[in-house]
């Protein structure tokens, strides 16, 4: 795992290009503490910067930027290609210099061309390729968006990097905030691809190749793979197999994906939450390992959020070498100041805090950690898929006045009151109907009552802010995710359309961003076997009954896991990996929040409207409603803005990331 950056600029300022490249590389030192390198083609103005975290072939033969054997291509590469040995064998006789997958990639591109080679790569990757013969720069990102890649123009230069902090080291970077992207962030807690919080900068979409013919040209972008195309292909050619056959085929495919991701020349472990996804990954790891797998989990003292007990039970049954850490509010306070430097863009998934801390915990014993991310999107695991369909089935039968009455009734009770009521009757509720934090879910139900279609209802479940343009002054909110839901519903039934929407947006822009930044801030490589594209493509060929059955998601994944772990250790309400932000904001985080949400602070920069924010804050403190999602968005942005008030401040941020990695 590594960090990459670079530019194409035809004019030279007072700073030497290699000096700029070195500064860009230094800003990514947390992503690659083991080695660094730069390349600059004086004739064209193309420059590459690189930081290396050595995982495979720890020798100098893995050094980057790397030239192809013929000298035609130069590459900087972040990620892993897990089937590189198969590709090496297919290429055959060649004067190989080492065992790095980067060298195999270059030779594959020499042999078959860029797109044909990328079609063969199985893994997670983001890379830049300079074709010296054709004078063309290409950027490429893996199919599911596991590895990040930003690009755009600053001044007259085209720039790219794994993280924005490297682009901020370019002397022409200005850092003007895009208010439309900020509105999207307020709704979703992240800035969706291809948007970026800064004007003129973008994220390369997953499964895309960008080609650039000159420094000032418009990039030409093409898909070599897309989640929608994979879904359509799968839905058009579904597998006609029995339950047993489907389970066996997925078991073999998953086992292979896990086995490939266990290959490393450094210690390997796994995150274990005790849920279906991470437990399945760990079970398949332990089944294929001759040693105890090192597993790690984070726990909370607050009930309703703690999954550490379940994780410990699963670890004990599988006989892993298990380490757990219980978090306190003070631990969260220590992480909050690191978030702006860690994420570059405002990013407000509250599970960013435990994800950082579990990465720090794992890094003390391993350099690579497998994760169960992706199972919900691929196998229909999110409760909101069932919730939205069930709610809409009822709401669609009611006239609008009746829906409004239902919403008013639900809002009459505070979330805490609903939680207490459910606790009293929990022994009488079947396990399949039990949910964590029912008060929050009932208030979300109240918000759905205004939806006119089921697609609109699902969009509402994905929204943290109903009217972001009222919060972000002078903004106009893009509609890409709303449009994506409608587009997906034209090719699939509603559950599959929701899954496809999440696979295309929430997964790469929230879940995988969180995993990448938190792990990389600690010099840890995180691998996600459930997102092997062959697993994803196989899953889309499975009829929906293999994913959602009898009101339960991830049916087929559960069936595989039950061969390794007893059902009674697993069949409990899903809690997720979120932190109890709602309680912390009323308690130990309140002084910090009060400072960030003061009317003068909110009005100072002319970006946010203080009135709706202050109203949300008052209702949250009173317990009238749980406003943690929206308020956390605002708080994270305010803290980010304070750290990024100017381009000069932004260039100093990598120091904070380095401190995080060292802590």
Image (cartoon, helix red, strand yellow):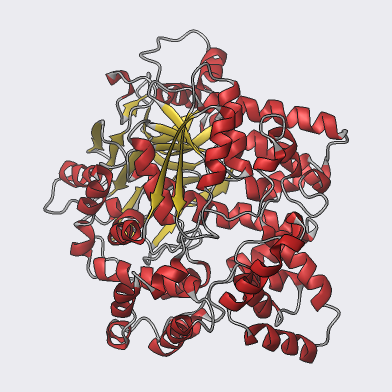
Q: Quadrant of residue 217?
A: bottom left
Where is residue 648 drawn, in percent x and y?
A: 18, 63
With 641 as the anchor, is 373 left or right in this view? right
Report the front residue among 184 and 9.
Answer: 184
Report the front residue among 613 and 212.
Answer: 613
Where is residue 332 drawn, in percent x and y?
A: 35, 59
Quadrant in the picture for the N terminus: top left
With 417 as the anchor, is 556 left or right in this view? right
With 597 as the anchor, is 531 left or right in this view? right
Report the front residue among 146 and 371.
Answer: 371
Q: Quadrant of residue 426?
A: bottom right
Q: Is residue 112 visible?
A: no
> Would you place residue 262 above or below residue 553 in this image?
above
Q: Is residue 628 visible?
A: yes
> Would you place residue 157 above or below residue 233 in this image?
below
Where is residue 208 drawn, in percent x and y?
A: 54, 46
Q: Quadrant of residue 605?
A: bottom left
Where is residue 32 drawn, in percent x and y?
A: 30, 36
Q: What residue appears at the point 45 percent right and 88 percent down from the top-left corner?
A: 615
> Would you place residue 657 above or below residue 59 in this image?
below
Q: What residue appears at the point 64 percent right and 49 percent down from the top-left corner?
A: 376
């Amino acid at each position: 795992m590594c960090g990459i950056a670079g530019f194409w600029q035809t004019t030279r300022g007072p700073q030497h290009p290699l000096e700029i490249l070195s500064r860009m590389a230094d800003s990514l030192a947390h992503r690659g503490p083991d080695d660094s390198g730069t390349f600059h083609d004086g004739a064209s103005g193309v420059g590459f910067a690189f930081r290396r975290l050595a995982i495979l072939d720890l020798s100098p033969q893995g050094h980057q930027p790397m030239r192809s054997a013929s000298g035609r291509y130069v590459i900087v590469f972040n990620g892993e290609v897990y089937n590189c040995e198969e590709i090496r064998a297919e290429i055959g006789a060649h004067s190989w210099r080492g065992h790095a997958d980067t060298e195999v990639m270059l030779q594959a591109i020499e042999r078959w061309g860029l797109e044909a080679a990328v079609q063969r790569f199985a893994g997670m990757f983001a890379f830049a390729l300079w074709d010296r013969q054709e004078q063309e720069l290409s950027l490429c990102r893996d199919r599911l968006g596991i590895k990040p890649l930003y690009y755009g123009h600053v001044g007259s230069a085209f720039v790219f990097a794994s993280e924005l902090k490297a682009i901020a080291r370019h002397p022409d970077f200005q850092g003007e905030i895009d208010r439309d992207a900020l509105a999207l962030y307020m709704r979703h807690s992240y800035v969706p691809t291809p948007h970026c919080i800064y004007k003129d900068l973008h994220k390369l979409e997953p499964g895309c190749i960008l080609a650039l013919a000159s420094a000032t040209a418009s990039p030409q972008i093409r898909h070599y793979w897309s989640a929608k195309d994979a879904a359509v292909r799968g839905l058009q050619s579904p597998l006609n197999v029995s339950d047993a056959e489907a389970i066996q085929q997925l078991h073999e495919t998953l086992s292979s994906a896990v086995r490939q991701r266990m290959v490393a020349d450094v210690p390997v472990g796994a995150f274990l939450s005790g849920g279906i996804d991470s437990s399945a990954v760990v079970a398949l790891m332990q089944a294929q390992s001759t040693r105890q797998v090192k597993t790690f989990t984070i726990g909370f003292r607050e009930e309703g959020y703690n999954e550490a007990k379940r994780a410990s039970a699963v670890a004990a049954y599988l006989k892993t070498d298990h380490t757990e850490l219980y978090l306190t509010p003070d631990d969260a306070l220590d992480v909050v100041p690191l978030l702006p430097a860690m994420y570059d863009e405002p990013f407000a998934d509250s599970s960013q805090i435990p994800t950082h801390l579990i990465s720090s915990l794992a890094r003390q014993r391993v350099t690579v950690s497998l994760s169960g991310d992706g199972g919900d999107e691929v196998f229909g695991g999110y409760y909101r898929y069932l919730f939205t369909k069930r709610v809409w089935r009822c709401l669609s039968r009611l006239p609008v006045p009746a829906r409004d009455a239902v919403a008013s009734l639900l809002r009459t009770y505070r979330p805490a009151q609903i939680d207490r009521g459910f606790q009293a009757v929990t022994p009488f509720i079947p396990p399949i109907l039990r949910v964590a934090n029912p008060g929050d879910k009932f208030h979300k139900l109240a918000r759905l009552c205004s939806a006119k279609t089921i697609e609109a209802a699902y969009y509402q479940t994905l929204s943290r802010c109903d009217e972001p343009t009222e919060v972000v002054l002078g903004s106009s909110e893009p509609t890409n995710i709303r449009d994506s839901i409608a587009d997906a519903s034209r090719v699939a039934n509603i559950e599959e359309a929701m899954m496809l929407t999440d696979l295309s947006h929430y997964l790469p822009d929230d879940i995988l961003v969180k995993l990448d930044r938190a792990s990389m801030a600690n010099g840890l490589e995180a691998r996600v076997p459930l997102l092997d594209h062959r697993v994803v493509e196989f899953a889309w060929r499975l009829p929906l009954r293999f994913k959602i059955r009898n009101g339960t998601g991830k049916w087929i994944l559960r069936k595989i896991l039950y061969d390794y772990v007893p059902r009674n250790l697993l069949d409990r309400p899903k809690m997720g990996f979120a932190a109890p932000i709602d309680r912390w904001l009323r308690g130990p985080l309140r002084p910090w929040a009060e400072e960030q949400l003061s009317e003068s602070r909110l009005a100072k920069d002319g970006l946010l409207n203080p009135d709706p924010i202050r109203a949300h804050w008052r209702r949250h403190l009173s317990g009238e409603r749980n406003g943690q999602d929206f308020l956390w968005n605002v708080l994270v942005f305010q803290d980010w803005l304070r750290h990024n008030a100017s381009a000069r401040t932004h260039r100093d941020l990598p120091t904070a990331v380095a401190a995080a990695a060292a802590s």
